[in-house]
Image (spheres, helix red, strand yellow):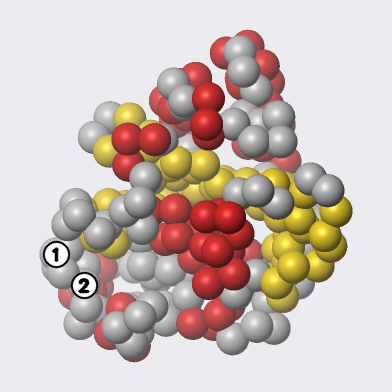
Amino acid sequence: MAGSKNEKQQSCTGWDNSACEGTEYCPPRCPRFVDSEGDARIARPFEDGDFESLVEMYDTLDSYSRTQGIPPATRPRIETWLSTLVEKGQNLVVEDGDRIIGHTAAVPATAARPELVVFLHQSVRNRGIGTELLKHLIAHADDQDHDGLTLSVSSGNHRAITVYQNIGFDVSVRSNPDIEMELSMDDPVAEQVKLFPAQRDGDE
């Protein structure tokens, strides 16, 4: 990312970024956010050095987190699965200190409408982090000129379905036991999630 240090500091002066109007050097969505319990977070692209921390996050997920066979149940299979996501997809993470607590990916990155996955560690659920990760993925997908995003979710996972619908995903296919959903980048939400913090309304 180009730009002088002073230019970056002008728009990134603290965790309260509500007045930030952004610059041309900003990523598709401001990486800084505060979760519902008041903890400062950063959502950012996956880096090579994150791999072991990401494996650890998935290896310590509780059994309730696994759905539709993912993430895999053993560490070697988790490593293989993540290697594919990293190689072929667009990946974003959220950290908590030196550990990763959230991950989302759109795969394959070359598809017009890649499929997304999103997981949070059970220790930080119900804090708005997953919703924020999804907004980041939408912003990055639109920035990369994708036509849309798709996902598959268990029909019994009502909480996740509600989250997806609240963001803007629509049901495209209903089949037992899964539901397929999609979001077009023509939907207004694709532009809304890229607004600078000062441009957002209170519900964004």
Q: Is residue 14 left or right of residue 91?
A: left
Q: Quadrant of residue 15?
A: bottom left
Question: Compared to 138, does 127 lie above or below?
Answer: above
Mark 1 vs mark 2, CA separation in Å:
6 Å
| Residue assigned mark 1 | 14
Residue 21 visible, this orientation = no
Q: Is residue 84 left or right of residue 142?
A: right
Question: Compared to 190, does 63 lie above or below?
Answer: above
Residue 177 % position (x, y): 79, 45
Residue 70 % position (x, y): 66, 31
Question: Compared to 183, does 181 lie above or below?
Answer: above
At a point 47% along the width and 75% down the height, the residue shown is 193
Query: Are the residues flagged by discs 1 and 2 in contact, CB closer than 8 Å?
Result: yes
Residue 138 % position (x, y): 57, 66
The one nearer the camera, 14 or 25, is 14
| Residue assigned mark 2 | 17
At a point 53% along the width and 25% down the height, the residue shown is 63
